[in-house]
Image: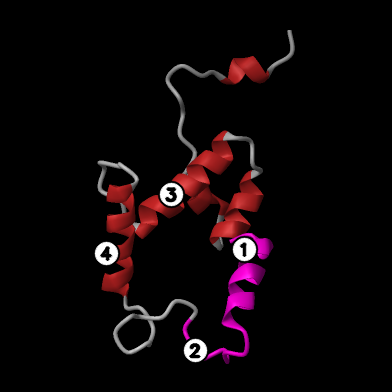
Amino acid sequence: MPVSVWNAVQSLRKDAGDSFPVFRSRKGGGHLDESMVWRIVRRASKRAGIEKAVSCHWLRHAHASHALDRGAPIHLVQATLGHSSIQTTGRYLHARPTDSSARYLPF
């Protein structure tokens, strides 16, 4: 999460202590449980017109894949995702059938 987004979320919390949830449940105001987060993500994907089965992990994978496709350094994506190994992050790299490493070589 970019620092600017984190700071914006934290500013919304005002004087809430660290033990208070960032995103509260509508039922009782406690933490959202994992099943509720899944439902929120699924509903949002349907409203966005995404027909594939979307999950939190799918969004994380999409973030990594798109960042790498747009030239983000792999070590930055590794740090952002919290991977301890660059090999784990490397799984998000996908060869494109219409692409070739030759286009990166000088002629």
State the mark number for residue 66.
Answer: none
Give me the C-alpha separation between circle 4 and circle 1: 23 Å
Whether residues under marks 2 and 3 lie with C-beta atoms below 8 angstroms apart, the answer is no
Query: Would you call the spot at circle 2 few (<14 residues within 10 Å), some (14-19), or many (20 or more)?
Result: few
**Which image quadrant for residue 80?**
bottom right
**Which image quadrant for residue 51?**
top left
Disc 4 element: helix
3, 24: nearer the viewer: 24
Query: Would you call the spot at circle 3 few (<14 residues within 10 Å), some (14-19), or many (20 or more)?
Result: some
State the mark number for residue 61.
Answer: 3
Comes first in the chain, label 2 or label 3: 2
Give me the C-alpha separation between circle 2 and circle 3: 28 Å
Q: Nearer the viewer, mark 2 or mark 3?
A: 2
Comes first in the chain, label 2 or label 1: 1
Comes first in the chain, label 3 or label 4: 4
Comes first in the chain, label 4 or label 1: 1
Query: Would you call the spot at circle 4 few (<14 residues within 10 Å), some (14-19), or many (20 or more)?
Result: few
Which residue type does callout 3 highlight? His
Disc 2 element: loop
Q: Is residue 65 magenta?
A: no
**Which image quadrant for residue 107?**
top right
Span highlighted in magenta in the image: 1-21
Which residue type does callout 2 highlight? Phe
Q: Position of residue 12 (x, y in %)?
A: 59, 76
Give me the C-alpha separation between circle 3 and circle 4: 18 Å
Q: Which residue is mark 2?
A: 20
Q: Residue at x 57, y 89 (%)?
A: 16
